[in-house]
Each structure stands twice: as structure tokens, then as C-alpha cells.
Image (cartoon, rainbow, N blue to C red):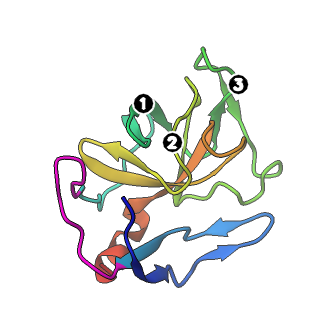
Amino acid sequence: MFYDVFRLIRHPEYFLDNDYINADVAVVRLIWPLVFSRIVQPIPLVDFRVEAGNRVMVGALLEMRVKLLLACSVFTDSYNKFALLWIHRNIIPAWVTPEMVCLLPDHPNRGVCGGPIEFNGHVVGIACWTLRPCGSGPSVYVRVSEHYQWISENV
């Protein structure tokens, strides 16, 4: 199903260059309101941080896969093990910021760029970037809680 967009509102602090992404969120205003159905349903946002170690759901077109939410600077070096590889700031100087959260690629990520991660029925993250092509892991998400007030003011 397609919807006509009236306006795209980027976060005022959005910034992108070769080494840095900041405030990678936007609000989409539609010409006509959504019609909710069994398939199209609203989902609340969180105004609190979901900490490392919690299990989350990665949004995909028609499937949800369980992933492990990790601290921002932690990735795994194996799809089948939870061995961790710390990526230091001197390797990737500013790509992972405190406003972001990373997911382990414990099985292939079927999420989509700009798609959500969900925790207890709330959107906690929005896909921002990945080390591999979009749709594979490990993936980095913008924390919704870091932009909750701005999103609320613009919906």
C-alpha cells in the first residue's frame, strides 16, 4: 500500500558526512490520515533508554526476528557465538555515538534501512547504518528515547 507524503521533517540537528551521522530521524506527514486495520496499527515510542542485554525485535516487512541489544561500541565477530569485538573510537572515530545502539548479527538481519526495533511493544530504535549492505548485521540504530521530545512535538 502506498501513501502520499505531504511533508518530510528532518531533525534540525541531522548531519551526515563520511565519518559521522547525527540525529538520523525524521517525521513523515501524510496528505491523508492512515486507515488502521489488522495489518496497519500504531505503535508507541519510548521515552526511556533500553539498556544493553535486553532482547528486542527487528522490524522487517512481514517478519520479526529476535536480536540482542548491545551497548553502542560492541559487535560480535561470529554469527553463532557471543564473542565480542570492541571497536575503539580510533578505528571508527564517531560512527557510534551515545544516541545509537548496536545489534549483534546472531542470525542474518532481515531488517530494513529506516526500519524499527521493538521492545515490549514500543519502538526503541530506527535503523541508521550497518557495516554490511542494508539488511545484514551488525546494525546500528538511533535510540528513539534520545529524540522522543522532538518526535512528539512534530507528529
* Mark found first going from the N terminus, 3 or 1: 1
Q: Which of 108 and 99 is in front in this view?
A: 108
Q: Read off the residue under disc 1.
A: 65
What quarter of the picture does the N terminus occupy? bottom left
What label sits on residue 113 in the rendered view? none
Q: Are marks 1 and 2 in contact (CB under 8 Å)?
A: yes
Query: Is the residue marked by circle 3 packed among few (<14), some (14-19), or many (20+) residues within 10 Å?
Result: some
Query: Is the residue marked by circle 1 packed among few (<14), some (14-19), or many (20+) residues within 10 Å?
Result: some
Three-letter amino acid code at the position of disc 2? Gly
Residue at mark 1 to residue at mark 2: CA–CA distance:
8 Å
Q: Is residue 116 magenta?
A: no
Badge 2 element: loop
Q: What residue sits 17% from the left and 47% below the top?
A: 38
Q: Read off the residue under disc 2.
A: 111
What quarter of the picture does the C terminus occupy? bottom left
* Mark found first going from the N terminus, 2 or 3: 3
Quarter of the rendering containing residue 56: top left
Could you say where residue 109 lies in the image, as x and y percent from the top left?
Answer: 55, 34
Three-letter amino acid code at the position of disc 3? Asp
Q: Which of label 2 and label 3 is nearer to you? A: 2
Badge 3 element: loop
Quarter of the rendering containing residue 16: bottom right
Q: Read off the residue under disc 3.
A: 77
Image: 6 above or below 58: below
Three-letter amino acid code at the position of disc 1? Arg
Badge 1 element: strand
Residue at mark 2 to residue at mark 3: CA–CA distance:
19 Å
